[in-house]
């Protein structure tokens, strides 16, 4: 297990280096000037700003190796647009907000997806199965910003009809602000996990060891909880890592619609303002977090199924 873990960590570090290099190259290939919004009224002021941010040096290799060296130390530099703020501080302020929202969203998606998937598999081709699968197709097909707008509209109508605020329409600060954004953010993941769990459960229920358990007189409840559910959950665990990373680091559109000061909103604003350092910092942070979650899931998968680490 130790060799398997070391191998996955090395592969993860190589992936992070590739993400950082690709992001750096892409940002410097984008047309535009990160100092175009600065009040550089004279050439001297502009040169001072370029020197401060290191833009007066060649992109390759100088700026590239400076970026890699700072990244290795965990330093993503100063923001171009937010005065005297380091990218690390912006990420530290925004990530906990996205993480709180993400934890609620992934809990809603994972628990709901596993239970609905198992339930529809047990009710295969009956009306509960057909109804849930139609809802799953809808959840996968409809973009999150549509659900966000519909969720806000439903809250506005509900608050007006009740005469008091059932749940806030936007904002951040209390648990009531998180409920609707978490549901909206987790819907597509819930739909995907439901479909995946249903397919996996149907395959497990027809396996030979399930037939053997039935032949030995094991109850259906025992078969479901002790054998079917555990083995059917393996594919779900595999995709849960990337799903956790994607949701926890921020739903870009959802955070914008509900005015949530998370990492996704910071990234969108950085792209709009061409803030090189903030874009590269958030992208590398997101990529590193995604790689970390994939490694964790791989290790958990190896503990659950010894065939993985043996291979």
Image: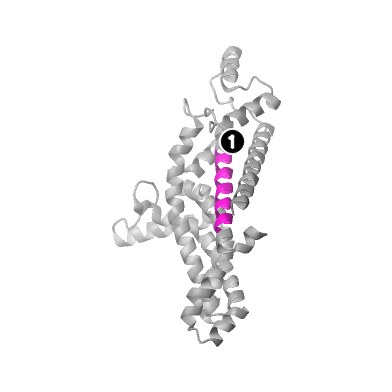
**What segment is highlighted magenta in the picture?**
282-300
Q: Is residue 180 left or right of 143 when viewed as pictured?
A: left
Q: Which of the 4 quarters of the picture holds residue 92? A: top left
Q: Residue 130: where, in percent of width, then height?
A: 55, 77
Q: Residue 54: where, in percent of width, then height?
A: 60, 22
Which residue is tagged 1?
280
Q: Is residue 231 left or right of 98 when viewed as pictured?
A: right
Quadrant housing the N terminus: bottom right
Quadrant housing the C terminus: bottom right
The residue drawn where x is 67% and y is 40% is 18
Above or below: residue 44 compared with residue 249: above
Q: Residue 276: where, in percent of width, then height?
A: 59, 32
Q: Is residue 96 left or right of 292 when viewed as pictured?
A: left
Above or below: residue 112 compared with residue 128: above
Q: Main secondary structure of the magenta part?
A: helix
Question: 92 or 210: which is nearer to us?
Answer: 210
Question: 196 or 1: which is nearer to us?
Answer: 1
Regarding residue 42, the answer to whether it shows in the image is yes
Q: Residue 307: where, in percent of width, then height?
A: 63, 63
> Is residue 289 covered in magenta?
yes
User: Label 1's element?
Assistant: helix
The residue drawn where x is 54% and y is 23% is 38
Question: 302 or 271: which is nearer to us?
Answer: 302
Q: Which of the 4 quarters of the picture holds residue 33? A: top right
């Amino acid at each position: 297990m130790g060799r398997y873990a070391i191998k996955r960590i090395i592969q993860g570090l190589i992936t992070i280096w590739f993400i950082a290099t690709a992001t750096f190259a892409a940002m410097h290939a984008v047309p535009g000037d990160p100092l175009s919004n600065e009040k550089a009224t004279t050439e001297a002021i502009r040169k001072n700003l370029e020197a401060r941010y290191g833009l007066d040096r060649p992109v390759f290799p100088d700026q590239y190796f400076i970026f890699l060296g700072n990244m290795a130390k965990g330093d993503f530099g100063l923001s171009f647009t937010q005065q005297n703020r380091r990218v690390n501080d912006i990420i530290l302020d925004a990530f906990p907000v996205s993480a709180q929202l993400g934890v609620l969203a992934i809990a809603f998606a994972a628990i709901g997806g596993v239970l609905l998937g198992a339930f529809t598999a047990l009710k295969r081709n009956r009306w509960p199965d057909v109804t849930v699968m139609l809802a799953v197709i809808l959840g996968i097909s409809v973009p999150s910003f549509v659900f966000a707008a519909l969720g806000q509209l439903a809250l506005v109508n509900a608050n007006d009809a009740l005469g008091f605020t059932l749940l806030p329409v936007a904002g951040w600060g209390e648990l009531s602000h998180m409920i609707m954004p978490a549901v909206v953010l987790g819907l597509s993941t819930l739909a995907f996990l439901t479909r995946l769990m249903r397919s996996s459960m149907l395959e497990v229920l027809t396996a030979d060891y399930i037939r053997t358990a039935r032949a030995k007189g094991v109850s259906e409840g025992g078969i479901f909880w002790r054998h079917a559910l555990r083995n059917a959950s393996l594919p779900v665990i595999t995709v849960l890592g990337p799903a956790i990373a994607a949701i926890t680091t921020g739903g870009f559109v959802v955070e914008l619609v509900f005015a949530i000061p998370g990492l996704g909103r910071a990234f969108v604003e950085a792209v709009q303002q061409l803030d090189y350092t903030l874009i590269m910092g958030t992208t590398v942070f997101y990529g590193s977090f995604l790689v970390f979650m994939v490694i964790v899931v791989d290790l958990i998968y190896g503990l659950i199924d010894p065939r993985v680490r043996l291979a």
